[in-house]
Amino acid sequence: MRMSVIGCGYLGAVHAAAMASIGHDVVGIDVDEHKVAVLAHGTAPFFEPRLEELLRDGLTSGRLRFSSDMADARGSDVHFLAVGTPQVAGGHAADLRFVDAALESLLPHLRRGDVVAGKSTVPVGTAERLAARVDETGATLVWNPEFLREGWAVHDTLTPDRLVVGVPDGAGGAGAATLLRKAYASAVATGTPFLVTDLATAELVKGAANAFLATKISFINAMAEIAEAAGADVALLADALGYDTRIGRRYLGSGIGFGGGCLPKDIRAFTARAEELGRGEAVGFLREVDAINLRRRDRAVQMVVDALGGLVFGRRVAVLGAAFKPFSDDIRDSPALDVAVRLRGLGADVVVTDPAALANAEAAHPQLGYAAERDDALRDADAVVIVTEWDEYRRDLTPEHAGSLVAGRVIIDGRNCLDADLWRAAGWSYHGMGRR
Ligand code: UDX
């Protein structure tokens, strides 16, 4: 099948490469000529496992190409819209400027019978508005939200938990659903559920999924606050809750909370849209979810201060992690960097290290100290704080090795990812979040 993918950011670049890898003929289109050149060279503009391999295979086979000319979308059977929807400056709503601009420039190239499949995360109601414009060309707009996680983007695109396609009423919608089913035939063949809905439901599924995940994380972090006051252990609590098959252990990881380019902005945009619809009170709890999440960052900073006897000014603090989560170089709304910046604000001599996100962190926060190597960050530290649970810190760092480098054996586990007993047995003062 011939496809175009409009917008080659995180979502679009991965989608284009993944679709080519399953045999489609794909052109990725982006207004950013530099990005197009980098991708056309087989290089991923961001850190994502397996992406470069897929890019190179696609480019070599001739099934994948990149362009900055929208006219190259002409002749595709499906046009995926995968542009960004950031938070509006000074507000919580989603900024739809890029979606609107991409669609307007695509319209002159659409043929009767083409399908435009929106993948971007948009406020419910957007698809219906865009569908009216697409209808004028004889093409059909469907909404096909993407649920990929950074670091797992290729895996999640090729083997998603489910596929959702929202279609307009009528014959055009049914035909478009059939075409999308064909586009994803390899996943459908291996049993991936393929759900056909109306446009609004498909848009809502994405917002609701992210809201639920954020709520689950903030729920366990709220329990961490209670555990701290009651002398209980939130990590054990999460294990015990997780065995209940109705609850499940995933997304009950307690610590400094969620960040990144999606969950924080998406729950705010979801709330803003609910308010526009006159149903703000239905999602009032999401404001609480956001507030609980931000409180964990304050708490982590306070724990470092307390562990250092109340004064961090001039003390050396090794900050292990900068990315918002492991297997990513993304520092957007990173709780890890937020904690580092606040400690620096209190006068600590902060040294940040990260296996993938260091360059991004240095560019965004030049006031912080940095070390490319983990051990250089640890050297002479008065306290160590783990804020991103990379394997290099969670699995590979032993208390003995770390102890041979630091000035003081004080560790704050901002991701509850270490074995507290092991570290304590090696003479460390270990502080987990919401743990005894
Ligand atoms: C998320 C959704 O998972 C994905 O479906 C959607 O398409 C985009 O947003 P992503 O932002 O890549 O994906 O990251 P995810 O792995 O979900 O983690 C989000 C944040 O939550 C990270 O900061 C992570 O550290 C944090 N998190 C996750 C926790 O604090 N505890 C957990 O148990 C899980």
Image (cartoon, helix red, strand yellow):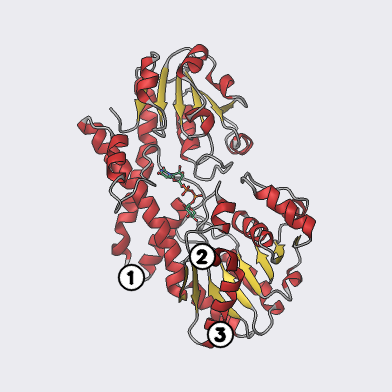
Tell me the element at label 3.
helix
Residue at 77% x, 56% y is 59
Residue 291 can be seen in this image: no
Upstream in the sequence, badge 2 or badge 3? 2
Occupied quadrant, residue 32:
bottom right
Amino acid type of the residue that numbered disc 2 sits on in the rendered structure: Pro
Q: Which mark is residue 172?
A: 3
Label 2 – label 1 distance at C-alpha: 24 Å
Q: Where is residue 166 in the image (x, y as percent from the top left)?
A: 49, 74
Residue at 52% x, 39% y is 326
Amino acid type of the residue that numbered disc 1 sits on in the rendered structure: Gly
Occupied quadrant, residue 431:
top left
Number of numbered discs overlaid on the protein picture: 3
Q: Which of labels 1 and 3 is toward the front?
A: 3
Upstream in the sequence, badge 1 or badge 3? 3
Q: Nearer the viewer, residue 11 or 159?
A: 159
Q: Which of 282 and 51 is in front in this view?
A: 51
Q: Which of labels 2 and 1 is toward the front?
A: 2
Q: Where is residue 186 in the image (x, y as percent from the top left)?
A: 59, 65
Label 2 Cα neighbours within 10 Å, binned few <14 / some 14-19 / many ≥20:
many
Residue corresponding to mark 1 = 278
Label 1 Cα neighbours within 10 Å, binned few <14 / some 14-19 / many ≥20:
few
Residue corresponding to mark 2 = 145
Are the two marked residues, 2 and 1, in contact with CB atoms closer than 8 angstroms? no
Q: Which residue lies furthest to the left in this view?
A: 230
| Position of residue 275 in the picture relative to residue 144 (left or right) | left
